[in-house]
Amino acid sequence: MGYSLVDGSYPMSIPRILIVDDQRDIIRLIHATLDSLGHDLEIVEAPSGEEALLEATQNKKLDMLVSDYKLPGITGVELMAKVRKRHPDVKTILITAMTDKKTREDMRSAGATALFEKPIPLADFLDVVERELGLDRTILIEENDVVEDDKSLSTLLTTLRKQIDAHAVLLISERGRVLVRAGELKDSSMEVSLLSTLVNILSVSQKVSRVIHQEKFHNLHIFKDGDQDIVLAPVDYSHALLIAGDDIARYENLTERLLPLEEYRENIKKELKSLGVTSREPDADGEESSQPENISAGSNVKTEQLEKMLDQPASKKKAKSNKEADAFWEEAVEKTGNIILDPDKLSYEQATQLGLTPDAKKK
């Protein structure tokens, strides 16, 4: 589909994504991962920077570039700069095996939309694709109920964020859903992984609260000295505040900065109750009535296995030959076509179909 020669604008079309990597198995897996979303996407592949640049010169709009950072003869940052001369609005996701801070900062300062280290966190990757391309969200779905339009809760979170000088304050449920947000995380591309991990922490924290018969929630879970400080503050048995910002958990001002939390937690709890959003109280035996919901999509291939394929082998003993790996994944993708984003959910029947069980190997 060409662009208009009158004003240079592009016609409406389905999103077009260019995947660039000199390893064919990486391209195939990223392509299959994108297919698992079920959206209408035009996906183009290029095994080199030169072919990617040739593709970018075609009279077709390019919405997203997904590229390895280290390509033969050119870096992903250099490729991004060249592609943007032709497509200034292109969204760029860079993938790298390099973990040093300077390289990451260079990629971010160059204007990359998102940066992922290998092994790629697939749920986060797909969430960024959906968010940046304006697609219907299927990975990280925010709650669609009375809470999201409530101005009182939004005001509470916005006021708290300004008062403690945080980047973001999110009210999340025990299922890892965002009910209300004020501000944005410093690196929103990792929001799925962060939420799913914090939900597990919240679940354990709730169990401790039940054991000690805690009536008011004063506990905090603090993570400092990373890309940004994170504070998880339970509100009740079903909700918590996620607070993120620079130096908000520094010891010398921790008490002063987080002191307002106590009042805000009580006010948020009251507001939720007034909206009819009640906390899931413990059962009579003290056990949880349900487990936190995992964020997932697709249904057949383990994310953990896919991510290992995108990573460098940890040792020669554990690494399969390239032929064996290619054969396995070609067969897996051909059989399933979908990718599961919850590494804890692979049924025995699915494992048998993929040849991962002892019984299947005997056949």
Image (cartoon, helix red, strand yellow):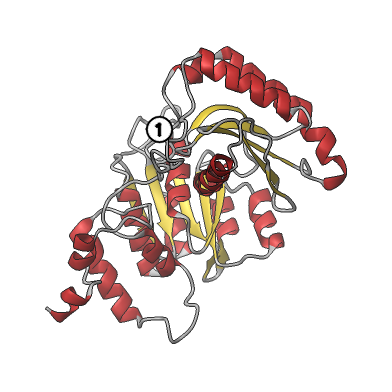
Badge 1: few (under 14), some or many (20 or more) residues near its Cα, within 10 Å?
A: some
Q: Nearer the viewer, residue 163 or 307?
A: 163
User: Residue 168 location, x and y as percent?
Assistant: 65, 33
Against 149, residue 136 (above or below) is: below
Residue that lies at the very extreme toward the front in this rendered image: 285
Type of amino acid under label 1: Tyr
The picture places residue 71, in percent across and down from the top left corner, at 52, 67
- Is residue 330 visible from the viewing direction of this image? yes
Q: Residue at x 52, y 33 (%)?
A: 237
Q: Position of residue 201 (x, y in %)?
A: 55, 48
Q: Quadrant of the C terminus?
A: bottom left
The vertical placement of 81 against 161, above or below, is below
- For the N terminus, give its image quadrant: top left
Nearer-the-camera pick, 211 or 91 = 211
* Residue 39 in which image quadrant: top left
Total marks in image: 1
> Residue at position x 52%, y 17% from top?
273
Q: Position of residue 25 (x, y in %)?
A: 35, 68
**Label 1 residue SS:** loop
- Picture quarter containing residue 262? top right
Q: Is residue 192 left or right of residue 23?
A: right
Q: Residue furthest left?
A: 363
Going 35% across and 53% down the picture, which residue do you hit? 33
Q: From this viewpoint, is residue 84 visible? A: no
> Of all residues shown, which one is farthest toward the right?
252
Q: Is residue 164 left or right of residue 336?
A: right
Residue annotated with mark 1: 10
Residue ID at (50%, 42%): 90
